[in-house]
Image (cartoon, grey):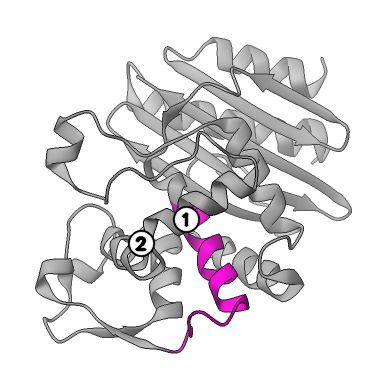
Amino acid sequence: MSWDVSIAKLAANVDAEVSIFIRYGDHSVRINEDCVLPAASTIKIPILMEAFRQRDEEMIDFSERISISPKDRVGGDGVLSLLTESACMEFEDLLTLMIVVSDNTASNILMDELGISAINDLCQSLGCPSTKIRRLFMDFDAMQAGINNTTTASDMMRLITALDQGKIGGKSGATQMIEILQHQRYTSGLPAYMTDSNIKFATKTGQLPGICHDLGIFKYREQKVYAVVMFHQLAEGEAGRRALGDIGKVIKEEIFRL
């Protein structure tokens, strides 16, 4: 059985709206890849990229220290909401927290500093029209009104490919962004079975009730896989996490042959 068939069979067994785009060389598996879904924390990928674009254009300074006021603090993922009221952090550290622990407070501050319209413009310029920020994280009024940040598997594929190829921030920017993504703390999805230290992965998750997304760049020696897997309206959240792990296991065993 080829790896794309294996992944399609796993996806078919998930009781959810499924959207997948996985690419290895000239081969790919695509399942509803243009379906527009709530992005959850995967929307933090274009926020990261826009920060590096603005740094490259000398619009911002990553060493600038930014005060984190009580009004900035929101719940959900992250640690900044737990710090003292006098907390102050460098711009680059906020980016790191946004990715590695998916800090929502850091994300909201960064969106304010960078400009939501600028982030959306970046997505548009990279051919990702369905990837849009429409609200801040933990904005419950907007959430109750059905306002969501959105994306598609195909858009996220374009974004992580552009990131890896240095189209934003050049080669040095790509290296730095990959390094940040490699420190991702939530690794129970696609990388769950990738215990071989020779496999390098740079990933970002997105989770909300009924939503379980994971995406990333996976490398083993000269082999590279770009993967975006999104589950929406999951009947049971743990089933999404297990399916992500099983899909990652296919990448490990049937592509990397480990």
Q: Residue at x 26, y 33 (%)?
A: 147
Q: At 42% from the left edge and 15% from the top edge, which residue is drawn?
A: 16
Where does label 2 land, which residue?
A: 111
Residue type, numbered disc 1 = Ile
Q: Earlier in the sequence, mark 1 or mark 2?
A: 2
Q: Nearer the viewer, residue 116 or 7?
A: 116
Q: Left or right: 174 with respect to 28?
A: left
User: In the image, residue 76 lies at what x, y percent?
Assistant: 22, 52
Q: Which mark is residue 119?
A: 1
Hey, which quadrant is residue 40 in on the image?
top left
Please say if the residues under marks 1 and 2 sit with CB atoms less than 8 Å apart: yes
Magenta residue check for 12:
no
Can residue 199 be seen at all in this image of the molecule? no
| Residue ID at (64%, 12%) | 9
- Pick whichever, 112 or 93, lies toward us: 112
Q: Residue at x 50, y 29 (%)?
A: 230
Describe the element under mark 2 as helix, strand or loop: helix
Q: Residues within 10 Å of mark 2 (few under 14, many from 20)?
A: many
Rendered view: 145 above or below 48: above
Give the secondary structure at mark 1: helix
Residue range corresponding to the magenta coloring: 44-63
Considering the whole magenta stretch, tell me its main secondary structure.
Answer: helix
Amino acid, disc 2 = Met
Crowding at dot 1, Cα within 10 Å, few <14 / some 14-19 / many 20+, comes out as many
Quick check: can you spot residue 62? yes
